[in-house]
Image (tube, grey):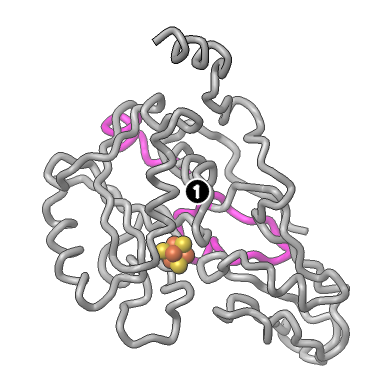
């Protein structure tokens, strides 16, 4: 017992100061990508060809489809953050920053370009009044590999301590204010997801976590899934990643609850 107490004192206070301080993510962390299409060699499609989920595309502005300095767009909802695009591009047109802020309310806001991007916005006043101080969530694993669930579980550890924000995972959708959905929604899970959704009392929230939950992720192209949560139920918050870091998940949830204010992130 004495040893346990000594160890505990030695460890000190371990809970992250996030969101009041920078989360201090390591250099190897891959967060929000930045695009510099002006570095693209004419006609080069190396990053596009390297992407396993076709998350990157060239976008020719109207009347300027000359294959030179073509603007790029990267869909965070498909991105696996594998870094294959950065390896494939010798010019450095695609790079990953340490910015953990990735969540958005609308699917189209997950498209990264050189323009300013819109981050997740807060719920309306009535919903914040209902959920702002106490949010109970039921997790539904609708396929996937299990890593997103592992990161959601990590939110409950002493470092992230989700409970300090009044957010908790509960065992039954009937006791929940919303669902957190991971996985691409396999055909076998469609009905189970619908039943879980209907069991949550209205008004309810739906949070889609991970590339699978947003688009099908690495399973894009398979006929055995629906291509993400939004194909089965309405989604209020999309949290990209494969899997998303707990800080990215927490950031998205806190934005939804109106605890984080800035709602724009600058483009490249
Ligand atoms: S998004 Fe990636 S980490 Fe999450 S379940 Fe799918 S494959 Fe696994």
Label 1's element?
loop
Q: Which residues are magenta?
A: 103-132
Task: Inspect this view and state whether residue 126 appears.
Answer: no
**Image side of residue 254 versus residue 144, left or right:** right
Q: Is residue 38 above or below residue 76?
A: below
Using a 10 Å C-alpha cutoff, classify the residue at mark 1 as few (fewer than 14 neighbours), some (14 to 19) or many (20 or more). Answer: many
Q: Is residue 116 magenta?
A: yes
Horizontal and vertical percent position of residue 196: 16, 57
Q: Residue at x 80, y 76 (%)?
A: 89
Taking the image in four quarters, ligand 1 sits in the one at bottom left
The quadrant where residue 135 appears: top left
Q: Which residue is mark 1?
A: 120
Label 1 lies in ligand 1 vicinity (Cβ under 8 Å): no
**Image side of residue 249 versus residue 227, left or right:** right
**Image side of residue 65 versus residue 220, left or right:** right
Quarter containing the N terminus: top left
The quadrant where residue 194 appears: bottom left
Horizontal and vertical percent position of residue 31: 65, 54
Horizontal and vertical percent position of residue 227: 37, 76
Quarter containing the C terminus: bottom right
Task: Inspect this view and state whether residue 45 appears.
Answer: yes
Q: Depth check: give the residue in front, 243 or 228.
A: 243
Q: Is residue 256 magenta?
A: no
Q: Is residue 97 above or below residue 219?
A: above
């Amino acid at each position: 017992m004495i040893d346990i107490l000594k160890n505990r004192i030695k460890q000190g206070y371990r809970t992250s100061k996030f969101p009041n301080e920078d989360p201090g993510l390591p250099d190897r962390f891959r967060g929000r990508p930045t695009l510099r299409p002006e570095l693209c060699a004419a006609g080069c499609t190396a990053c596009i060809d390297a992407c396993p989920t076709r998350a990157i595309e060239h976008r020719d502005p109207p009347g300027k489809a000359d294959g030179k300095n073509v603007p790029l767009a990267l869909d965070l909802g498909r991105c696996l953050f594998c870094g294959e695009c950065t390896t494939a591009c010798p010019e450095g047109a695609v790079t990953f920053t340490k910015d953990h802020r990735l969540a958005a309310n609308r699917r189209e806001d997950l498209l990264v370009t050189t323009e300013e991007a819109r981050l997740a916005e807060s719920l309306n006043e009535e919903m914040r009044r209902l959920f702002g101080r106490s949010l109970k969530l039921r997790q539904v694993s609708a396929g996937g590999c299990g890593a997103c669930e592992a990161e959601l579980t990590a939110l409950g550890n002493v470092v992230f301590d989700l409970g300090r924000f009044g957010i908790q995972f509960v065992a039954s959708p009937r006791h929940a204010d919303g669902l957190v959905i991971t996985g691409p929604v396999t055909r076998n899970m469609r009905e189970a997801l619908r039943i879980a959704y209907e069991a949550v009392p209205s008004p309810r929230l739906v949070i889609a976590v991970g590339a699978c939950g947003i688009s099908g992720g690495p399973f894009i192209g398979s006929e055995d899934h629906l291509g993400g949560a939004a194909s089965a139920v309405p989604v209020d918050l999309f949290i990209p990643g494969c899997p998303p870091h707990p800080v990215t998940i927490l950031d998205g949830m806190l934005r939804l609850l109106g605890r984080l204010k800035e709602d724009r992130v600058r483009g490249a």
